[in-house]
Amino acid sequence: MTGHMTGSMANFTTYVNHGQNVIASKAFNKKDANTVSQIAQRASFKLMAKAYRSFGGILRKNFTDKPETESAYNVFMRINLPEAIDKTSGVPVIDYSKLQVSQGGLPPVKVTTAVAGATGITVSYKTNTGIDDVSASDQIVAFGKTLEGELIIARKARGGEAVNTILIPYQGISASDVVCCYVVAMSEDGKQVSDSTYTTVS
């Protein structure tokens, strides 16, 4: 009589099941990891990771409500995949209007207009200083990306007027040059931010 058999030889493997020796053949074909869905998922991940890097280091301080053990990169990836990916054309692309580049406890900035002109992009916004947790000394950060991949940015104090403006300097820019534009509020000490506001540049 043979004893318990365990091991592997050629295209067979042996094991014991409920005291019985079992001999099974190995699978010759591994499960295909390149289905259309899996390829699209990997492409979406790479696309989003590239988007994070394209904003330089400014996003590292834009997720103030995250757990200490989680990085800004991980938060960015978690909240934007798959929500900010558009697959309607069959090829994944980023939907910048759904992309969140900031997440925190301050109220989002209410943008009224964003206009491209000879000196740059002028963004008008409501200061909303009558709302709890909003201060005239908060920093307003407006930034965007051009078709050529340039990151453009401006910062200024929120201000106390009912409506204020911030200029993102860029000589001769037009609306067609802009891939995306966002506005974020940050507390004076940098410990709190708002969710990002996507704005269409005209």
Image (tube, rainbow, N blue to C red):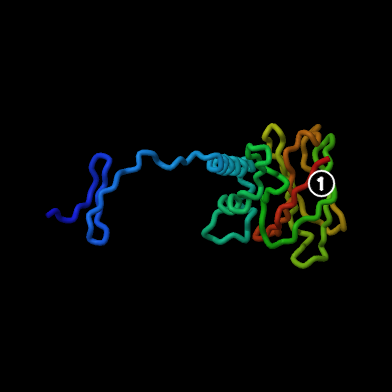
**Which percent across, then down, holds residue 137?**
76, 59
What is the three-letter code of the residue carrying label 1? Val
Q: Left of 3 or right of it: where is 57?
A: right
**Which percent across, then down, holds residue 160?**
84, 59
Residue furthest to the left: 1
Q: Left of 33 or right of it: where is 12?
A: left
Q: Residue at x 84, y 49 (%)?
A: 124
* Kind of element beneath mark 1: strand
Work out which quarter of the rendered image holds the N terminus and state it.
bottom left
Residue furthest to the bottom: 132
**Which percent across, then down, holds residue 151?**
68, 39
Q: Which residue is mark 1?
A: 123
Front position in the image: 114 or 99: 99
Q: Residue at x 59, y 59 (%)?
A: 66
Q: Quadrant of residue 180?
A: top right
Front position in the image: 13 or 186: 13
Residue furthest to the front: 1
Q: How many marks overall?
A: 1
Front position in the image: 164 or 22: 22
Q: Quadrant of residue 25?
A: top left
Q: Is residue 46 visible?
A: no
Q: Left of 9 or right of it: where is 158?
A: right
Q: Is residue 131 visible?
A: yes
Q: Residue at x 56, y 52 (%)?
A: 74
**Which percent across, then down, holds residue 202?**
83, 40
Disc 1 crowd rating (10 Å Cα; few below 14, some 14-19, many 20+) is many
Q: Quadrant of residue 132?
A: bottom right
Q: Residue at x 40, y 41 (%)?
A: 30
